[in-house]
Amino acid sequence: MASLQTRIDGIPAHGNKHLLDDILRHEWGFDGLVVSDYFGIANCRGYSRCGDNVAAAKLSLESGVDIELPFADAYPSLREQVGQGKVSQAMVDRAAGRGAAHEICGGPF
């Protein structure tokens, strides 16, 4: 599922934990892969909590976006953020696990 290119109550959908985790995953029971809409993570930069790609990557991952599309622009910073203790390895593993499960069970499309 692709996240939205919109804001809800001023919060970008790609950085909205309430929308992607609380509602989509817990309330509705969605257990699949959430990918960014084209450059949606980069679009979080205009949000007050995300001044750059590093902050946008952290917010999006912690909100429930598993893969950045159309290419990795912000998510490569997650490796360094894990090393610095800013992002948990468990969060990265969770996203990677969902991606692997998708490939094994459903293929790329």
Image: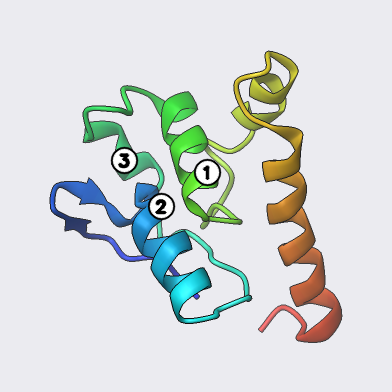
Extreme residue toward the right, this view: 104
3D distance between C-alphas at marks 2 and 1: 7 Å
Which residue type carries mark 1? Glu
Q: Is mark 3 on a helix, strand or loop?
A: helix
Circle 3 Cα neighbour tier, 10 Å, few/some/many (<14 / 14–19 / ≥20): many
Residue 25 x, y percent position in the rendering: 52, 71
* Callouts 2 and 1 close, C-beta under 8 Å: yes
Viewer can see residue 39: no
Q: Which of marks 2 and 1 is nearer the N terminus?
A: 2
3D distance between C-alphas at marks 1 and 3: 13 Å
Mark 2 or 3: in front is 2
Which residue type carries mark 2? Lys
Residue at 52% in and 55% down? 64
User: What numbered label is drawn on residue 44?
Assistant: 3
User: What numbered label is drawn on residue 62?
Assistant: 1
3D distance between C-alphas at marks 2 and 3: 13 Å
Residue at 32% in and 65% down? 4
Please give the residue where the numbered disc 2 appears in the rendered image.
17
Extreme residue toward the top, this view: 84
Residue at 33% in and 28% down? 50
